[in-house]
Image (cartoon, helix red, strand yellow):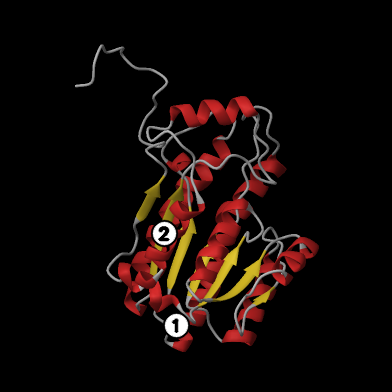
Amino acid sequence: MDFFSDLAGKRVVITGACGVIGRWIVDAFRAAGSELCLTDAGDADLTAYAAGIDLGESGFAHAADLTEEASIDALIAEISKRWGSPDILVNNAGIYPSGFLLDISTEEFDRIFSINLRAPFLLTKGVALQMIHKGVKGSIINISSGASRKMRRTVVPYCTSKTALDRLTKGFAIELAEFGIRVNALEPGFVAGSSVSNLTEDHVRNTIAAIPLGRPSTAADVGNGLLYLASDASAYVTGATLTIDGGNSIGSLAVHQAKKHPL
């Protein structure tokens, strides 16, 4: 963590903080000595989680429903009241519901894009304005997915929302560069289920078997990549997508020609 010592005392906003990857992100920034603002949809779960960890001297938790613009505005206002501006925003919150396109309702389609795309737009816009007003040359990181480039049956709206998030990342990057604000995306690898994505044992086993490096993501994989994008180590990086998924998004091991010996 010494490599990312410049993150000590930095003020970091993390959405979807109570999820599996969200907690990994929280732990990474805690280890780096950052001050944290945690947000998630469940007020009781968020309060209980935040009460059990050190958020830093000025850290706080604030529940927000990312499908509601008023709730997002309230979160942005609370950040302004507490900090004036954060140094880092991590748009991590996302949902991964499963269903064939012919079965998905308009309401469900809209909910996916509301959380996975619209919320990062609104939060990035609000936080970037705070950064500009306070003269903060900050870092904004969107948690994307290899699904943005590799279509998957039964989660097409999710894949599409992540493709759009990648384009939004590049759009904000090019427009915020003049203010010294960097915007990048991180694509974590496969994580074996969460509170919003219940996966069968067969699905988990088959997915891991198809990953070129042969294992799922770990907290260290996500944390190291995230801290790199947040820190001065990536001071000349913006509009980029860092993929840390063991090669899962580059192709499939499911179909291959048999060979008698290594090349």
Q: Quadrant of the C terminus?
A: top left
Q: How far separated are the C-alphas under marks 2 and 1?
A: 27 Å
Left or right for 230, reference 90: left
Location of residue 36 with respect to 159 vertically, above or below? below
Q: Earlier in the sequence, mark 2 or mark 1?
A: 1
Asked whether the residues under the numbered discs 2 and 1 touch, taking CB atoms below 8 Å apart as contact, a structural biologist would say no
Type of the residue with mark 2:
Asn
Report the side of 258 relative to 87 (left or right): left
**Can you see residue 84?**
yes
**Residue annotated with mark 1:** 132
Amino acid type at mark 1? Ile
The number of numbered discs placed on residues in the rendered structure image is 2
Question: Given this view, does label 2 or label 1 mark the residue nearer the observer?
Answer: 2
* Residue drawn at the location 31% of the way across and 12% of the way down: 258
The location of residue 249, given as percent across then percent down, is 40, 37
SS at mark 2? helix
